Image: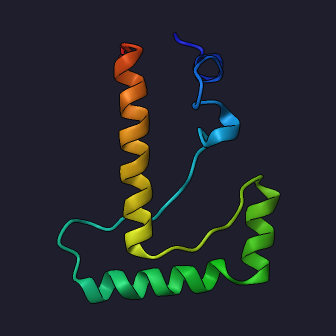
Amino acid sequence: MVDQTNLLHKHAGFGLVSGAGQWLGVFAPARTPADVVRKLNEEINKALSTAKVQEVIRTLGAEPMVSTRAEFIAKQEADRTRFGAFIRANKITAD
């Protein structure tokens, strides 16, 4: 098995400090009505903005962040592009 941490550290621009961390998000099924997605985003962001939820998330070693649907999609696409190129260049497989 590939030691992913060392592999990422060895390649310029892919060190853990430069964004090879992890993130969590909430997904809904395809074709979920836009008003439902908007409301879910609104309520999740509201919860993430409370001191209690932020405290709990920080005790888990994470940093709470709110975003719009568009920002979340952009983050996914950027990561897919960035790490997809890295994976292909290093011939990493899921074997």
| 75 relative to 12, above or below | below
- At a point 39% along the width and 73% down the height, the residue shown is 69
Q: Quadrant of the C terminus?
A: top left
- At a point 49% along the width and 61% down the height, the residue shown is 25
Task: Please tell me in which quadrant of the rendered image residue 15 appears.
Answer: top right
Near-viewer residue (18 or 45): 18
Residue positioned most to the top: 1
| 86 relative to 32, above or below | above
Q: So how many labels did they put on this image?
A: 0
Residue 27 visible in the displayed image: yes
Near-viewer residue (85 or 27): 85
Q: Position of residue 83 (x, y in %)?
A: 43, 34
Relative placement, left or right, of 6 versus 54 is left
Residue 94 visible in the displayed image: no
Near-viewer residue (95 or 18): 18
Near-viewer residue (35 or 79): 79
- At a point 20% along the width and 66% down the height, the residue shown is 30
Relative placement, left or right, of 67 versus 16 is left
- At a point 37% along the width and 42% down the height, the residue shown is 80
Identify the coloring. Answer: rainbow
| 42 relative to 10, above or below | below
| 78 relative to 37, above or below | above
Relative placement, left or right, of 27 versus 56 is left
Relative placement, left or right, of 75 versus 7 is left
Task: Please tell me in which quadrant of the rendered image residue 10 appears.
Answer: top right
Q: Position of residue 61 (x, y in %)?
A: 77, 52
Residue positioned most to the left: 31
Q: Position of residue 9 (x, y in %)?
A: 65, 22
Residue positioned most to the front: 12
